[in-house]
Amino acid sequence: MKCPTCNKPVDWKDNAHRPFCSERCKLVDLSKWVSEEYRVPGKPIPGDTGEEEGTREVPPGAGTEN
Ligand SMILES: [Zn+2]
């Protein structure tokens, strides 16, 4: 089973946040549903979104050695 939010393997044993891996992911998913419900056409919610866009992490040392 994988966490619907972050796609990480979820430990189902003693996990109070199933099917999520953590409370954080649970809240993230919850807020997703909430924003869907309260979504107003043509009126995007300021902040909180678009942070993952264009962010690309390059591992340090990649291609620099040798
Ligand atoms: Zn997760």
Image: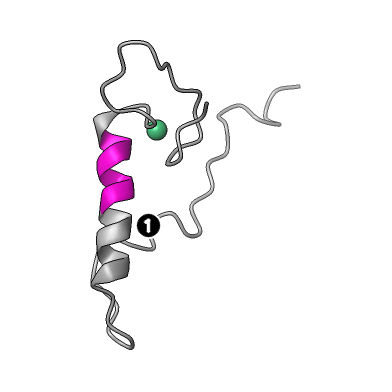
Please state if 40 lies on the left or on the right of 1 as rendered. left
Above or below 13: residue 36: below
Query: How was the colour assigned to the protein in this rendering?
Result: one colour
In the image, what residue type sits under mark 1?
Answer: Glu
Residue 40 appears in view: yes
Q: Is residue 27 magenta?
A: yes
Quarter holding ligand 1: top left
Q: Residue at x 48, y 52 (%)?
A: 55
Image coordinates for residue 41, horizontal then vertical, percent: 33, 86
In magenta segment, residue 60: no
Q: Nearer the viewer, residue 53 or 18?
A: 18
Question: What's the magenta bit mostly, secondary-structure-wise?
Answer: helix
Q: Is residue 60 above or below residue 14?
A: below
Q: Is residue 62 left or right of residue 48?
A: right
**Residue nearest the observer in this picture, 44 or 26:** 26
Quadrant of image for the C terminus: top right
| Residue found 25% across the figure and 61% down from its top | 34
Q: Left or right: 20 with respect to 7?
A: left
**Ligand 1 contact, mark 1 (Cβ < 8 Å):** no
Q: Identify the image quadrant of residue 48.
A: bottom left
Question: How far across and down, in percent of the image, does residue 7 sit?
Answer: 51, 35
Q: Which residues are magenta?
A: 24-30
Read off the residue under disc 1.
51
Tally of marks: 1
The secondary structure type at the circle numbered 1 is loop
Q: Position of residue 4 (x, y in %)?
A: 46, 40
Residue closest to the eye, 37 or 61? 37
Please tell me in which quadrant of the rendered image residue 46 appears: bottom left
- The percent position of residue 12, horizontal first and vertical second, equals 40, 17
What residue lies at 27% left-to-right and 49% top-to-bottom? Answer: 30
Q: Residue furthest top?
A: 13
